[in-house]
Image: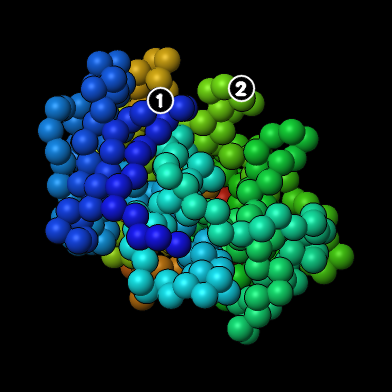
Amino acid sequence: MDRINKLDVFYRERLVGTMALYERCLAAFEYSDAWLADGFPISPFSLPLEKKVFIPKIDPLEGLFGVFSDSLPDGWGRLLTDRLMLKNGMNPKQYGNLERLAIVGDSGMGALTYRPSVELGQKSQERSLDEIAAECAQILHEDYNGNLDYLFEKGGSSGGARPKILTKVDGEDWIIKFPSSEDYENIGAEEYDYAMCAKECGIEMMPVRLFPSERCEGYFGTKRFDRLSDEENGRIHMVTAAGLLETSHRIPNMDYHLLMRLTLQLTNSMEECEKLFRRMCFNVFAHNRDDHSKNFTFLYKEEEQRWVLSPAYDLTYSYSIGGEHATTVNGNGVNPGMADLLAVAKEIGIQGATARRVASQVNECVEERLRKYM
């Protein structure tokens, strides 16, 4: 693959702007004139709709703006990309983020696509979910590249540590996950139970299913919130909290106070803050401590010209660094409780009685539905 010094960024076939390599390591960005005329800021705080060349910092996102870093695969997707590069005689360390975004092309999460695009994998025959799970386990446990092209085609643009495929289910776009090397085999059933409990707690969730297996209790799948059935306008623009704040999700440096202020400033909606509060309560009571800055996403509703919180995702019994919450609650990551939750609600302006009622309702629901995981 040739080195790439410039990439065009598109949204639903409209040219948003161009990224170009600056000082050999920074991906400078400039909006196109057409986008400046009738587009929207793709990352409101870092990339306002202005006629200028925007220069990112080198750290912590390796010279990318956060909204573009969100398009890059990490965890499982990056592992597949690096393995496929090696298989094709390429040294992954010699290629930068512009080349990696070109490999993502139009297969990434969200609405942004990148040109020129680079094809790495080759088409392969479909496989059963149990076969895919076995292939994923082999790749995670040994230097195995047997069906690498197929796994890359299905999940090379994905994020997160857990193996997954991006696929069609009844004509709609879904994600189906498989156990990582650190998971137990029935993690799919656990995530399904968590998703159903979250929905009962009043948290917005996409449709989920537990896909059957002969190896375990099933594989967790969820319909994608960044895709619509409309083929012409089927992509939804999204940015994670990490992308908006220009920070790495690998650095636990966020508190729910900050996340609340970000939500209010971006959405200008107390209703969205109340959604986040309910989600925070669930994470505390259900022991979902992997609540890092990439596990909160905002969607842009172009027709309404406004931002909203995406449906919740990646909910399981989990830990972050040191066993604490990745996002602290009122400064407390070790053992946050009702007092911390109410303090976060009070600072952002949620009425005390409302906050206490919501927190109590979520706590009761979690204790009833997820007792076996606690």
Residue carrying label 2: 230
On the image, the x and y values in percent for residue 133 come to: 73, 67
> What residue lies at 79% left-to-right and 56% top-to-bottom?
125
Q: How is the image coloured?
A: rainbow
Residue 129 in view (yes/no): yes
Calculate the distance from the C-alpha at mark 1 to the C-alpha at mark 2. Answer: 17 Å
Q: Is residue 109 above or below residue 31?
A: below
**Between 66 and 123, the one nearer to me in the picture:** 123
> What residue lies at 36% left-to-right and 37% top-to-bottom?
9
Is 261 on the left or on the right of 303, as rendered?
left
Residue carrying label 1: 14
In primary-sequence order, the first of circles 1 and 2 is 1
Dot 1 and dot 2 residues touching (CB under 8 Å): no
Secondary element under disc 2, as helix, strand or loop, is loop
**Between 300 and 81, the one nearer to me in the picture:** 81
Q: Residues within 10 Å of mark 1 (few under 14, many from 20)?
A: some
> What residue lies at 42% left-to-right and 30% top-to-bottom?
11
Is 116 on the left or on the right of 132, as rendered?
left
Is 202 on the left or on the right of 127, as rendered?
left
Q: Is residue 181 above or below residue 123?
A: below
Q: Quadrant of the N terminus?
A: bottom left
The amino acid beneath tag 2 is Asp
On the image, the x and y values in percent for residue 130 come to: 80, 64
On the image, the x and y values in percent for residue 232 come to: 57, 22
